[in-house]
Amino acid sequence: MTINDIESLGVIGAGGAGFPTHIKLNSKPDTIIMNAAECEPLLHKDMALILHHSDVILQGFKIVMEITGAKQGIIGIKNKHPEEIELLKSKVNGNIQVITVDDVYPAGDEVTLIYMTTKRIVLPGAIPISVGCLVQNVETLYNIGLNKPVVEKFISVAGAVEEPATIIVPVGTTYKEVLSNFNITASNYVVRSGGLMMGILEDDLNKVISKRTGALIVLPDDHHCVTMYRRFSTPHATDIIAKAGCDQCYYCTEFCPRYLLGQPVRPETAMRNRMFTREDFPMLDPGNLSCCECNLCTMYACPEGLDPRGATVIEKRLAREQNLKWDGEQITVHPMYEYRKVPTKKLMQRLDVLMFKDEGQLKDININPKTVRVPLDQHVGSPAKAVVNEGDPVKKYDIIAKASGKISSNVHASINGIIKKVTPSEITIKSA
Ligand code: SF4
Ligand code: SF4
């Protein structure tokens, strides 16, 4: 298999990033890291994939190692998964090893995982290849090993549902249709797609599953997390709250995983800058470009219930717009790094989600949508361009939109049917 094959299959980062994989593979790392450190609370789909499809995943892993010429492969997995660890260990040898990491959040952040598995430190503003590493999510490797166009997605359905599960869903299926297969235990609820920490609060259940959707978490409408998400739903709200309430206690920074790795991220500075800044006189800290947006500062650390993440993200955007860069030369891991890691259970307690079942076996639910709306902008970069017209018959796996531009990815039909509608953002297919 070649990079061109992976490009034609439309493989993108399935962990949520959505970066086209063929572009990422066009590099020469010495180490490939399989990111099996699934760290969003209540998500189990990567572990379900490992238990049921380890051969395909490892096939994808070996293909990536061959294509890039990497000398070693590392599987980074949390030590709380003995069954999956044993299974993987029984199937790898030689230059691939399994390295276990603590059950902390955000172990799946690639800069964090690189440090935890190799002790290499990615400098602020740099990417993993700068330290010879390339990180690939479990499902991305599965998609490579499967060697078929990517038209389905594994997702965790969890939260206020009777039986949480991992299921496989055709791309373009609405959330509403997915959830109709579950008994929801809340009378009024909303859905967080992607994950409690880094996902998106969705009010519209007609939104569809894309190649980067990792989860649908159902939450009662009056749940603590929903209140937090809603309070900080706009940069303006974050700005006002920063100006009103931050007492500069510094907890957000003290718990920030990137700060603890030595990166110059300072959410408390971002909050202060929001307090004193003016549109025409922004005070910015380019160190905040290293924020990975993990949300730990807002959802876990801040004792005042404020939004340091939001403030840091505003700083990131402004610093990017002004082309600011971190100009230091080296960083050192914080001496308290080992002691300030946030255990997942503690995070779940803080998020008030311990009442939900923390499980997600792979379930054979046959989701056969009558209509799918396949997004053309599922990946980072330019949307794909449709190559079909209304009325065209298509079969599952047919290409329906081609990559356009330097960074883009192909899109394929996820069901057999007839093209009903084509817009610049999505293609609707009605099943035959
Ligand atoms: S933890 Fe909250 S109150 Fe404390 S400095 Fe950060 S934003 Fe301000
Ligand atoms: S979201 Fe907050 S805790 Fe996470 S990296 Fe950014 S500043 Fe640090």
Image: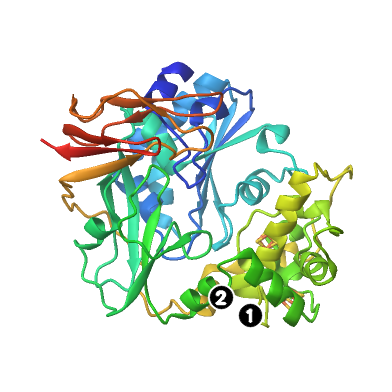
Residue, far front: 280
Q: Residue at x 47, y 80 (%)?
A: 352
> Which of these two is toward me, 61 or 218?
218
Q: How many marks?
A: 2
Q: Position of residue 276 (x, y in %)?
A: 85, 70
Q: Position of residue 389 (x, y in %)?
A: 26, 26
Answer above or below: position of 174 versus 345: above
Which quadrant would residue 127 be assigned to in this image? top right
Mark nearest the camera among 1 and 2 is 2
User: Residue 341, can we see it?
Assistant: no
Secondary structure, mark 2, is: helix
Relative placement, left or right, of 394 versus 245 is left
Which quadrant would residue 254 be assigned to in this image? bottom right
Callout 2 amino acid: Arg
Give the quarter of the figure containing the C terminus: top left
Q: Residue at x 78, y 43 (%)?
A: 123
From the Cβ of disc 2, is ligand 1 less than 8 Å away? no
For residue 305, the mark is 1
Ligand 1 picture quarter: bottom right
Residue, far right: 328
**Label 2, residues with CA under 10 Å away: few <14, some 14-19, many ≥20:** some
Q: Which residue is mark 2?
A: 231
